[in-house]
Image (spheres, helix red, strand yellow):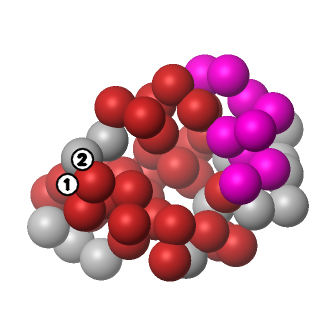
Amino acid sequence: MKYENLYELIKNDVQASEYYLTLPDYVKDQIASRGSNVNSLESLQDYAENLLRGDD
């Protein structure tokens, strides 16, 4: 399911919220700065994995 943005996603999707909470702060900060582009668990995971690899 797709949500409006990161905040709607983590508010309404327990799995996405739990995953987000496990991320390092610097990754959460980067994701939050582009929260309008993160609208599903898959997009959250993809973006986080790219950041953790050092990509952007």
Depth order, front residue of 43/27? 27
Residue under label 1: 52
Q: Is residue 4 left or right of residue 55?
A: right
| Circle 2 crowding by C-alpha within 10 Å: few under 14, some 14–19, many from 20 | few
- Which amino acid, mark 1? Leu
SS label for mark 2: loop
Along the horizontal axis of the image, is 38 left or right of 12?
A: left
Pick the residue in front: 49 or 31.
31
Name the residue at 85% across, 61% down: 4
- Circle 1 SS class: helix
Residue range (magenta): 7-15
Residue drawn at point x = 81 percent, y = 33 percent: 12
Taking the spot 44% from the left edge, 51% from the top edge, the residue there is 46
Q: Are marks 2 and 1 in contact (CB under 8 Å)?
A: yes
Q: Is residue 25 magenta?
A: no
The label on residue 24 is: 2
Real-space Cα separation, disc 2 to disc 1, in angstroms: 9 Å
Q: Is residue 14 magenta?
A: yes
